[in-house]
């Protein structure tokens, strides 16, 4: 009946192949026992407080579980290094395939003639230059979308 809790016995006279999975809508309301709403939970320890440490003697208010945030100057310095690296590498990859003195007279390419024939193709040079443009774009995008993390 819909309003009364159903009971299931562990032993059944039916064959196990005839058992069906219980539909949650058929179970009705679930009784969890008496629940006191608004009951004080002062008996439970706070998850950030160690009960063995006297909090009146505590010097630092920072939890030892959390790492300290990175200083702002270090975040900004790492951003500058990342942007300079991306732009520098992007310019090299953008220009290098079209610099004939280096690209066409390369000892590595001379050792592998099939690779040289492939890399001297204009479409391949353009694709490599496109990777350089993407790298420059990543560096500029990092600089534009930068936000300080203050923890």
Image (tube, rainbow, N blue to C red):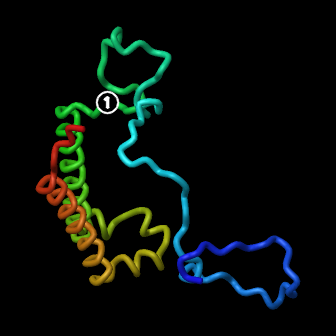
Pointer 1 residue: 68
Tell whether 46 sits left or right of 10.
left
Left or right, residue 13 beside residue 137: right
Q: Secondary structure at mark 1?
A: loop
Viewer-nearest residue: 92 or 98: 92
State the quadrant of the C terminus: top left
Q: Nearer the viewer, residue 86 or 117?
A: 86
Q: Residue at x 47, y 51 (%)?
A: 35
* Quadrant location of the N terminus in the rendered image: bottom right
Question: At x 65% / y 75%, what residue is drawn?
Answer: 6
**Residue 107 placement (x, y as % from top left):** 42, 62
Q: Position of residue 150 (x, y in %)?
A: 20, 38
Image x and y of residue 123, in percent: 29, 84
What crowding class fits label 1: few (fewer than 14 Cα within 10 Å), some (14-19), or many (20 or more)? few
| In the displayed structure image, the side of residue 63 where residue 26 appears, left or right | right
Name the quadrant containing residue 41.
Answer: top left
Near-viewer residue (8 or 95): 8
Identify the residue at horizontal 32%, vertical 79% (top origin).
Answer: 124
Depicted 79 relative to depicted 110: above or below: above
Q: Measuring 55% from the left and 82% from the top, which residue is drawn there? A: 2
48 or 137: nearer the eye?
48
Q: Residue furthest bottom?
A: 18
Image-based side of 66 in relation to 151, left or right? right
Residue 33 sits above or below residue 64 on the image: below
Relative image position of residue 43 (x, y in whole percent): 46, 30
Please determine whether, in this image, residue 1 is positioned above or below residue 10. Answer: below
């Amino acid at each position: 009946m819909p309003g009364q809790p159903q009971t299931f016995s562990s032993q059944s006279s039916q064959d196990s192949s005839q058992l069906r999975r219980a539909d949650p809508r058929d179970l009705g309301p679930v009784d969890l026992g008496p629940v006191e709403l608004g009951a004080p939970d002062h008996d439970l320890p706070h998850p950030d407080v160690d009960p063995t440490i006297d909090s009146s003697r505590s010097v630092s208010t920072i939890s030892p579980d959390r790492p300290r945030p990175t200083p702002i100057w270090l975040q900004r310095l790492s951003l500058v290094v990342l942007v300079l690296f991306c732009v520098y590498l992007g310019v090299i990859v953008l220009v290098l395939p079209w610099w004939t003195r280096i690209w066409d007279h390369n000892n590595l390419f001379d050792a592998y003639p099939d690779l040289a024939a492939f890399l001297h193709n204009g479409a391949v040079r353009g694709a490599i230059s496109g990777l350089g443009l993407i790298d420059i774009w990543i560096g500029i995008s990092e600089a534009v979308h930068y936000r300080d993390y203050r923890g």
